[in-house]
Amino acid sequence: MTDDAPITFPLPNASLDLTGQVALVTGASSGLGYRFARTLAAAGANVAACARRVDKLEALAAQITADGGTCVPVQLDVTDADSIVAAVDAAEAAFGTVTILVNNAGLPDAQRAHKMSVELIDAVLDTNLRGPYLLSTEVARRLIDAKLPGRMVNISSMGAFNYNGIGAALYSITKASVNRMTEALAVEWARFGINVNGIAPGAFSSEMMDGMVARLGNFVADTARGRMGDPAQLDSTLLFLCAPSSEFVTGTIVKVDDGQGSR
């Protein structure tokens, strides 16, 4: 910054207004993705809610519309490269260039590493890593061509940092890879004004977490505060990373785990 060209920001520089932004959210048919889509729409973004279960997406879009927001349901299979391109095309046709991407779709593995079939290994890798990578590059390519800034938020997991051998090794590996993907793409696209960050949630209520509790028992009772997170408790972190106030933040993974991962 030079004296003749100062950069000034309002005080506080904390705007969460997403009016005019176009957000694409994957895994939006349930759980955290469902909440993320509603949260972004409530902040003013036009939301393309993506998942395989179109009926669930239509119900979400109706709810967002009833709340005064704007949402279009878009069928997406993140393991299919053609489906990824088609989904971005659909979002663009509805609202214009996607400026916010939330890579939320994920697939847990519930087997020991040496017992997993090749088909399950491929499904976990394709859903948790290959799909988000392809979708990120597709959205980035269009932002760069349009000379627009953007925000990307990759949903990681505290499993990327801690694994206790309970039978989700590949999930842990893919989420650690998502963290590195976030850091690497943040560096690559910084010059284009595209910020890439991640959120690593602890145990939050969702369909995926319900399955883990059913399989492993109520492990949450043994955590630092003995409680499960409510998806609403991720709102502030998501909005910050998608909003103008995080303009100088990129390549960061924010842990939101209630102290669960530090035990």
Image: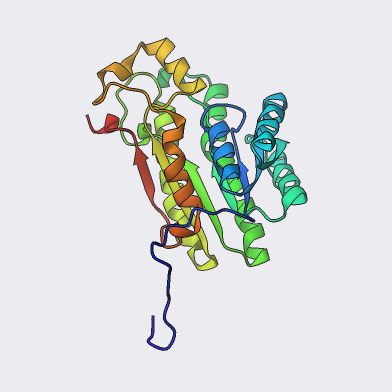
Q: Is residue 156 above or below residue 183?
A: above
Q: Is residue 192 above or below residue 91?
A: below
Residue 159 at x, y = what percent?
36, 31
Quarter where residue 127 is shown: top right
- Left/right placement of residue 219 relative to residue 173 reads left
Quarter where residue 79 is shown: top right
Task: Name the residue at 39% across, 38% down.
Answer: 200
Q: Is residue 108 visible?
A: yes
Pick the residue in front: 59 or 185.
59
| Placement of the N terminus among the 4 image quadrants | bottom left
Task: Name the residue at 50% across, 54% down.
Answer: 243
- Left/right placement of residue 247 relative to residue 38 reads left
Q: Which residue lies most toward the bottom here?
A: 4
| Placement of the C terminus among the 4 image quadrants | top left
Q: Is residue 151 above or below residue 26?
A: below
Pick the residue in front: 232 or 1.
232
Residue 230 at x, y = what percent?
42, 28
